[in-house]
Image (spheres, grey):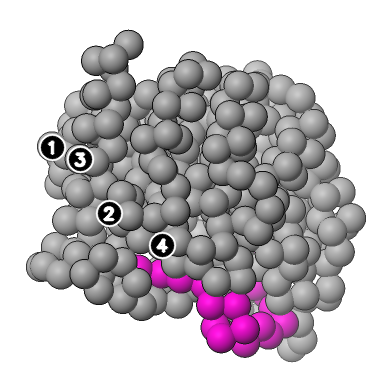
Amino acid sequence: MKLGLGLYRHMLTPENFRFARQAGATHIVAHWVDYFHGTVKIPESDDQRNWGVIDNRDRLWTYEELRDLKAAVNAEGLELAAIENLDPSHWYDVLLDGPLKAQQLENIKTIVRRMGQAGIPILGYNFSIAGVWGHVQGPWARGGAESVGFLGPDGPRETPIPNGQVWNMTYDPDAPPGTVATVTSEQLWQRLNDFLQAVVPVAEEAGVRLAAHPDDPPMPAIRGTARLVYQPHLYQKLLDLYPSRSNALEFCQGTIAEMSEGNVYDAIDRYSRQGAIAYVHFRNVRGKVPRYHEVFIDEGDVDMIRALKIYRRNGYDGVMIPDHTPQMSCGASWHAGMAYALGYLRGILHTLEKEA
């Protein structure tokens, strides 16, 4: 198993690559979407090429940008394991079954081909309209460290999704007034099937794995829209839609543990035995829907050593990233939390290697 670190777009810097390497990581998972500044349309003719500052929104990622990002990661002694998440502007009508769906599917195929050309092996995605929604922050981790949680009826009030938004990001600021119509489970599964049937063959040719994230929070529906993978067994339904190594899982262990049914250890065993896991979000939680919160990697409901032994027993040799971490009380709260998680995970992996 390989140790990795996920970095948001504004954190894709040589300094953070060096931090990852110093903390023992060998791989980077890059979030190419700028979640923190929303999404707005920009001219299609924009042709900047500096991967560190360019605004990706509403245009396709170029081969040159992907190549240069990979080169920057490699320059610090790391490998680029994956790009995580598509920009909403790339595929909103794929999610909404809108008039631009066919063109946007072609655009995703182009992105996948460019990733393959650049030697980036995995594209993580979350086939969801509401996205990650309803989380709040609180002092729920050890020592009162700030982390995120979901409080069910005591959390934010669910409201319809405004037109022009998916995944809590605005792809069309000029959208007409109104809200996204109700989306049923059957409709969303059909849209996912359309996506997989169109894109998986291209991913196979490009040598890229599409890796699906489960729904977080794992609820059957949120804000009037259905969810896909809100119980562990539904991952199998997704895999069975298009059996292929390129139809794989971004296995978020924390989200699986939050689900109201099933057992996280059984899920790890089931999907790692199939070789279906592209990479792992390795984090710990307390509680299950409708109430849970994230905690430090060593204090939650999941026995992380037991989990790692299952991955190892079944021959999983992919990347594991801490995903999220509570914020520690110091001047570099995110870096401290991640260094703690990476050190904990590295120590266990090293011990398991010695036992082999």
Q: Position of residue 231 (x, y in %)?
A: 70, 51
- Residue 308 included in the magenta stretch of the image: no
| Res 294 label | 4
Q: Residues within 10 Å of mark 2 (few under 14, many from 20)?
A: some
Q: Nearer the viewer, mark 1 or mark 3?
A: 3
Disc 3 marks a residue whose amino acid type is Gly
Q: Are marks 2 and 3 in contact (CB under 8 Å)?
A: no
| Res 343 label | 3
Q: Residues within 10 Å of mark 3 (few under 14, many from 20)?
A: some
Q: Residues within 10 Å of mark 4 (few under 14, many from 20)?
A: many
Question: Is residue 180 found left or right of 168 in the rendered image?
Answer: right
Task: Give the extent of the magenta segment.
Answer: 147-167
Residue under the point 39% across and 40% down: 304
* Helix, strand or loop at mark 1: helix
In depth, the one of 102 and 307 nearer the eye is 307
Judge whether residue 171 can be spotted in this image. Answer: no
Residue under the point 51% across and 63% down: 287
Seen in the picture, residue 12 relative to 310 is either above or below; the reply is below
Mark 1–mark 4 Cα distance, whole angstroms, equals: 25 Å
* Quadrant in which the C terminus appears: top left
Circle 1 sits on which residue?
Answer: 22
* Helix, strand or loop at mark 4: strand
Query: Mark 4 or mark 3, which is nearer the start of the sequence?
Result: 4
Q: Position of residue 246 (x, y in %)?
A: 64, 26
Query: Mark 4 or mark 1, which is nearer the start of the sequence?
Result: 1
Query: Mark 3 or mark 2, which is nearer the start of the sequence?
Result: 2
Q: Nearer the viewer, mark 2 or mark 3?
A: 3
| Res 11 label | 2
